[in-house]
Amino acid sequence: MILFGRKHLHVSESDQIVDSLFKILNSTSGFVKLEVSNRPALKIEIDRNDSAEGEDNNDNIRRTIVKLDLLEPTFFSVPDDQTGLFDKLRTATEFAQKLTDNGITFSLLRKGKEAITLGEGARPSLSRIITKSDDIQLDSVKESVKLKNDFDDA
Amino acid sequence: MLNNDTGKHTSMGEGQRGKTQGEEQKVQSQWAQVVSQIMEKVVSGTNMSSTIEFDNLEVDVPKATGPDGRDLGGATWKLNGKVVWTTEAHKD
């Protein structure tokens, strides 16, 4: 896979697929679980809440938290994909910004442990050095590296 | 824009825009390729069984207007249950 600069995962202003995905996420809540060959592979939890912005403001702010737990991470590796996880993160700034703009927090977990958070709920400190983004946070460097190795080694 | 292949910075002038859009399309198709390969593993892996389970999944369907201008209202879909599919390879 060839990288074309920082905006590798480019999301244009009027990307209909991404807009539709965000609309669906913002109107969905609950759990989806995937088992492959009787082994849990993936769990998706979508938690949505509406809260008033302020006492004088009747506009509801919709916030959505999507937790994607890779219970069998090696299953999701793609041998042909030459880009590593951290390369992908560095180039996902536009996508993460758009998540924030839509009030969506996207958490990537490895076997139940939080690894990476993108979007509104991200509070990066040191991870800003790697990603150069306010919308991408490495919750756990240890879990993120394990996840990278799962994808690379499979 | 930094081109990782050459390590050189390239400008985003009008002349370059067409090429850049082409590159973006290529990149997007590569992302789509990654996603589709994962989907293919799940949906059409041979000799395996896959289960997708919906647990209290709620989807709010927004209000809609019918072709005759009639208000169709909104809805909330609730999904609970499992879908299991198995794939077998045969030598014919």
Image: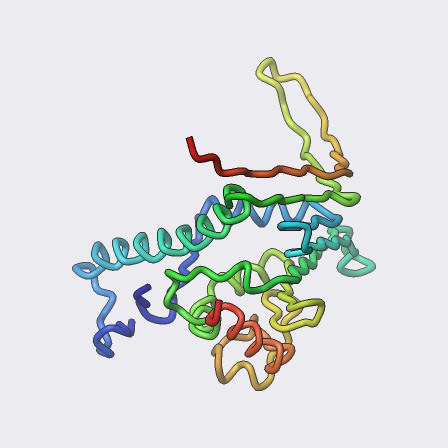
Q: Which of A100 and A150 is in front in this view?
A: A150
Examine the rendered structure and indicate whether residue A89 appears above or below residue A64: below
x, y percent for residue A35 = 66, 50
Where the N terminus of chain A falls, by quadrant? bottom left
Examine the rendered structure and indicate whether residue B66 appears above or below residue B40: above
Q: Which residue lies furthest to the front in this view?
A: B92
x, y percent for residue B36 = 45, 48
Residue at left offset 70%, top offset 57%: A63
x, y percent for residue A53 = 75, 59
Residue at left offset 73%, top offset 51%: A59
Residue at left offset 24%, top offset 76%: B9
Residue at left offset 59%, top offset 77%: A138
Q: In which quarter of the image is residue A49?
A: bottom right
Examine the rendered structure and indicate whether residue B26 appears above or below residue A123: above
What colour scheme was applied to this rendering of the protein?
rainbow
Q: Which residue lies furthest to the left in this view?
A: B15
x, y percent for residue B29 = 35, 51
Judged left or right of residue B75, residue B10 is left
Q: Residue furthest top?
A: B68
Q: How many marks?
A: 0
